[in-house]
Image: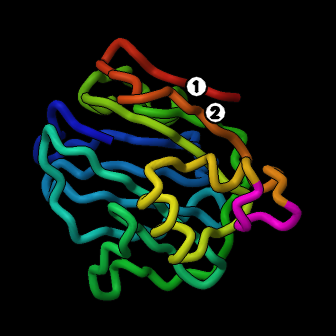
Amino acid sequence: VKATSLPTSGSYTWLISKMLAGGNYSYDLYVEGATKKVKARLSLDGTALVTCTGATVLTTATWYNIVVVYNGIDIRIYINGALDSNGANNPYTYSGGIFNSTADFTIAAPSKEQSTTDAPQFYWQGSIDDVAVWGRALSASEVSIVYALGDFFEPFLSGGGFIAGGTSGAFKGVIKTGEGGAVLTNNKKFYEK
């Protein structure tokens, strides 16, 4: 991701979301305005949320490779191929699983049902490239290798040894935008059902 602007204090901008209001939470990834840090939230039961917070303070006009991994033991945020260590906040110990929400999966905006207002301040302002959701946890070395190669998909799709048998069956969904990413403003939202 590369921001053209970041949220202000008291606001957030979503990178991805799969949450509905009223007890149908699954997961989301966003930048908090007060700290300019990346946060990832998961829910076990659709209502309660746990939050993992990275240490890096994001700035505008800089590309960041952000990966969130939940491995059944903890939640981890990686930035540019390395764990974004933040004491007990990252990695964040959590073994409760992820609730299977019926919410839409959204990119660059909160799930459309998550908020009663369609406020532009919640939309990511900038570029997003190579969004993917896997059906398994990537290891730290896989995150590092994929970052070093500059391509989230090729090592997985070409039998690069990460997936048994060289298949792409671990993918849950992918959006590949090409070189340079998709530029997103408050009138561009991506939804996948």
Q: Secondary structure at mark 2?
A: loop
Give the total of numbered labels. Answer: 2
Coloured how? rainbow
- Answer with mark 1 or mark 2, whichever residue precedes in sequence: 2
Residue extent of the magenta highlight: 159-165
The front one of 183 and 118 is: 183
The residue most toward the top is 187
The answer to whether residue 177 is above or below residue 21 is above
Mark 2 and mark 1 in contact (Cβ < 8 Å)?
yes
Q: Specify the amino acid type for callout 1.
A: Tyr
Say few, some or many: other residues with alpha carbon within 10 Å of mark 1 (under 14 / 14 to 19 / 20 or more): some
The answer to whether residue 174 is above or below residue 91 is above
Res 187 → quadrant: top left
Name the residue tied to disc 2. 104
Res 81 → quadrant: bottom left
- The quarter in which the N terminus is drawn is top left
- The quarter in which the C terminus is drawn is top right
Name the residue tied to disc 1. 191
Tell me what residue is drawn at x 30 percent, y 19 percent. Answer: 185
The front one of 184 and 9 is: 184
